[in-house]
Image (spheres, coloured by chain):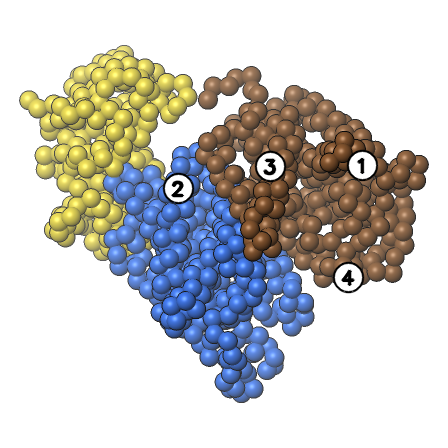
Chain colours: A yellow, B blue, C brown
Amino acid sequence: MTVVLKVADVRGGYGGADILNGTDLKLDEGEIVVIIGPNGAGKSTLMKAVFGLATIRSGSVSFFDRAITGMRADQVAKLGMSYVPQERNVFASLTVNENLEMGAYLRDDDFGPQIERIYELFPPLRERRRQQAGTLSGGERQMLAMGRALMLDPKLLLLDEPTAALSPRYAAETFERIREINALGITILMVEQNARQALEHADRGVVLVMGENRFEAPGPELLANREVAEMYLGG
Amino acid sequence: MTDLLQLLVFGIVFGSILTLGAIGVSLIFGILRFAHFAHGDMMTVGAYFALVFVVQAGWPIYMALPAAMIGAAVLAILIDQSVYRRLRRTAPVILLISSFGMALLLRAAAQLIWGTDNQVYQPGINVPYVVFDIRIKPDHLVIVGASVILVFAFHLFLKMTRMGKAMRAMSDNVDLARVSGIDSERVVIWTWVIGGALAAAAGVLLALDTRLNPQLGWNVLLPIFAATIVGGIGRVYGAIAGGMFIGIATELSTAVLLPAYKPAVAFTLMVLVLILRPQGLVRGMN
Amino acid sequence: MELGGIIEYGLFFLSFVGIYALLSLGLNLQWGLTGQFNIGIAGFFAVGAYTSAILTTAPSPHHLGGFGMPLAVGLVFAMVLAGLVAVLVGLLTVRLRTDYLAIATIGIAEIIRLGLKNEEWLTNGVRGIPGIPRPFAETLGQSDGVFLLVVVVLILMVYLALEAARRSPWGRVLRAIRENEDGVRAAGKHIERFRLEAFVVGSMIMGLGGALFAHFVGFISPEAFTPEFATFLVWVMLIAGGSGNNKGAVLGALIIWLVWTGTEFLTSMAPPEYVTQAGALRLLMIGILVQVILLVRPDGLLPEETADRTK
């Protein structure tokens, strides 16, 4: 099986003290992997480090066997990886359609059909295509953020807390969408606070504590693990 | 009444000039996050570029203006690449100091090359049209007309082109722009092209309205900052409203105050806006 | 030149260095220690100079006063008035980010300069105020040496006070605000108050410098308070010497004044057609110098001393 992403013994953070203390991670093609763990465990930092937005002091990251350790974010994007930050993940003053165009900034071909596909995946966005993204509801904003990230037709999608600040109904719907995206052949790595629900939809879960991997197992197995359940899933 | 209408005309003329300057300051702030103190002196140098084309090459002003804009755009890129780019990695406040130094450097250079005397593009009297007792000079029409055309062209650039949209995206959210693969260095260069070109246009039009000397741009830097802040710093469309507001308000103030205090009026209005709506304006940066 | 002439020139030269050292020390408290971007030094400098001039000169029909008061009164009120202006500016901008403070300070400085030029009843406009007395002129005469001594004593007092402040808990809070505003706020400190205090005290020192300038040259007019000479040179001095370091502030004043005087010497050798442009040429050289310093040695000759210098 093809390995999409490999993180090996990564240490680093944002210049100060290390937040990641020897983190490992491996994603196979077509998987949905969810990272869970307590606050401050370095979940978001790990994603940022992969995408070239946090500093890696030692260790390595490779994407389809290609070393991308310390590469700039726009170069990583060019290789076929997309990232949806947790907050401020749309261009609020641009219209919905312009947001999607910015997602396709690196494409030189006609991306009209891709925008069509995004609107098919997220129908509410089509109605609001000329509206400023800042005026969207929380759920619509999350759709747009994912839509923007899909414009480059990535092979790997990084999602940082896609259901934070969403109502339970929207959260469930968002997980459904993530599955649909995955069904298109896109490997997905996400960080989730909403751990139980996320694990139900994931192939595998990784528990990150103090910047180190603690457990790693298929979703249902982690859910069944008493220690994990007590400590990281709220009992 | 006629007097006030006359001042309103002057205000619209001055406001058109301020708008061109304020758009540049706002755009630079939106992309590079620092108040560009050399903007006024960039206007001055741009105005002198046009003088060179008019006097030495004998071009008419409508040809000299675009040529000066190109010249100033090139100058702005050179300044950015030789100095600002190297300082960008450190704190934005270092850029503030550097641009303040650059302001003096440009002014001193202008004085060395072109002297301190007042100069004009075309000698002779600009005979005004008289409409209902209000005097409007042909130059006034040129200034407002050129400004409207440039602002509209800039608007189209922002709304229709890929680079224009990338500029708005980066001004809105730098991190997300980078994540989307937008090459920030290219956006920065385009920012200087537009900022520099519009500064030159503002300088040429101001010199057309008044007289050209090395202090030309420095004298209006404060009104331009006021226009930028009143419009919401970082918001280029706000700069248009801010420019017209400050232009008209400062001209109307001369009905009761010494004209020398125009910058003070602009400054006071800016302070009032800062007191009344500080949050609104600060939020406007994003 | 005879030895006497050289000594005399040296005293004259050092007096100017002393005045600029005060400005540079005041700026160091604001920028070096607290990170406040004041580019309206000229305004506080002018307020100090005019206040002391009006208070200490003999009565004149051309401007307000003079009130013929003792020099010490002039110096104290120069500081008080500069401080009051600083309170005003500070209250307006203390919550806003640096760019606004920069714009506000340069705005106030320009408005003060416009006022000095146009309010003739107060300042005699562009014709200026002459006959400003030297310290101890009646008893010790118009010697530059006496003046220099006064300046040195004042600098020493200001320097020692600033050093004590820098090492005090107050100074540590200021540095902490500069480095990590949110952290200090989280620790429950009233950031705005600390900032305002530093800004006001720094501006008072600038006002003192302005008063000494007036008493040294004996004649002031709005020409002396342009941003080039009264603001920009001070910034170059502090950056060259080392922001955050009080010794650096004084050293920078000495070195840059030496360079500035040197450029006068250089331009005097320029071809005659450039002589009228000497001022511009000198500014151009200083303008280039500051860019070079920022690019090559941004920490200055004497970088800030910190206990935990990690960077």
Amino acid type assigned to the residue bearing label 3 in the image: Val
| Residue sitting farthest toward the front | C1
Q: Is residue C63 visible?
A: yes
For residue C144, the mark is 1
Q: Chain of mark 4?
A: C
Question: What residue appears at the point 50 percent right and 52 percent down from the top-left corner?
Answer: B109
Is label 3 or label 4 in front?
Answer: 3
Residue occupied by mark 4: C120
Is label 2 or label 4 in front?
Answer: 2
For residue B82, the mark is 2
On the image, the x and y values in percent for residue A62 come to 18, 23
For residue C130, the mark is none
Amino acid type assigned to the residue bearing label 2 in the image: Ser
Where A126 falls versus B259 (above or below)? above
SS type, badge 4: helix
Q: CA distance from mark 1 to mark 4?
A: 31 Å
For residue C259, the mark is 3
On the image, the x and y values in percent for residue A29 come to 10, 27
Is label 3 or label 2 in front?
Answer: 3
Q: Chain of mark 3?
A: C
